[in-house]
Amino acid sequence: EEEVQRKKEIIMKRKLEDSAREVHTPQLLEEQERLIATLIEAHRKTYDASYSDFSQFRPPKRGDGSPECRNATNPFLMSLLNSDMDELPKASASGAEAAAGDELSMLPHLADLVSYSIQKVIGFAKMIPGFKELCTEDQISLLKASAIEIIILRSNESFTMEDNSWTCGSNEFKYQIGDVMQAGHKLELLEPLVKFQVNMKKLDLHEAEHVLLMAICLFSPDRPGVQDRCRVEEVQEHLTETLRAYIACRHPLSCKHMLYTKMVEKLTELRSLNEEHSKQYLQISQDAVNKEDLPPLLLEVFGNPTA
Ligand code: ZYD
């Protein structure tokens, strides 16, 4: 008897789902619910909100406030006074290099943070249904093109409007505009980037919406080099349909107005942030005196101008 009741319930549920599809009433289908659960789990497994791995990166060096920087006019005197050496190191005898090295003082730490984040984004991608089924070349094309966009999106979790910083635990791992400038980036990127973070925060997305947006961003069929555009588009459409349905039936009425549209607009803004980042990255990778500052994975994903 219980069995009969269960079967009846299943049939009823199917009928409801079918009629919902007919009249285009967005309703979360069982399959969509499972997809959302999978994405949330994938994100939780790849985003450590305790940021405990950050101490393994090369340490952040903030030029401002350091003795070298307070006395920027006498960098050589400063370094001799602060070290046990009594001779200028040969390599930096020209001055310009020392200044550039100082400017990029945050680069090793932030390059490690980005390299680490790329690895996490790859882990996230591999758990998205449909990604592993693509050929390796397309997986690489999608990841190369979207890595910085997904990093910008996921970083919203650590961003706080209190002081417009990315706060990842202690003060040591609190990143402000000035810190990113000391990795060589300029306001043409940083100003719209912080605005983007503030506007994202204001959308106050549910975790389901946040992870769907990252997955939708990854599955963009128009990225350079993508062969099987149709497969990528199919998966993206399935993700966007799930997002629409989720917003329609789970997001409170008062704040769902235009939410889907606003989220799609964010994808456009990400493209322009991506473009500006690429330009500035190229400049930084050319300026970097110590090529070891940029980890190999980062060079592979964003490009290696000296290769
Ligand atoms: C997340 O994956 C994890 O939320 C945490 O161009 C922290 C985090 C912050 C992201 C930030 C803050 C994550 C610093 C500035 C960034 C920003 C996202 C985009 C700009 C990171 C990563 C880029 C730093 C400089 C990159 C240097 C190169 C690669 C040369």
Image: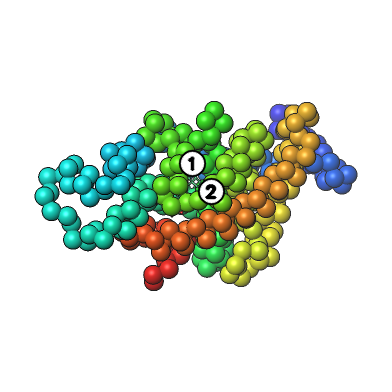
Position of 105 compared to 37: left or right?
left
Q: Residue furthest front?
A: 73
Q: Residue furthest right?
A: 23
Which quadrant of the structure image shows residue 197?
top right
Specify the label residue 187 is tagged with.
2
Asked whether the viewer can see residue 5, the reply is no
Q: With respect to residue 179, does 228 lie above or below?
A: below
Position of 133 compared to 52: left or right?
right
Specify the label residue 177 is tagged with.
1
Q: Around disc 1, counting alpha carbons within 10 Å, would you say few (fewer than 14), some (14 to 19), or many (20 or more)?
A: some
Residue at x-position 67% and y-position 47%: 266
Q: With respect to residue 161, does 197 lie above or below?
A: below
* Quadrant in which the C terminus is drawn: bottom left
Q: With respect to residue 121, does 142 lie above or below?
A: below
Position of 190 compared to 255: left or right?
left
Instruction: Indicate the position of residue 214 as horizontal and vertical percent values.
Output: 59, 47
Residue at x-position 22% and y-position 50%: 76
CB under 8 Å between discs 2 and 1: yes
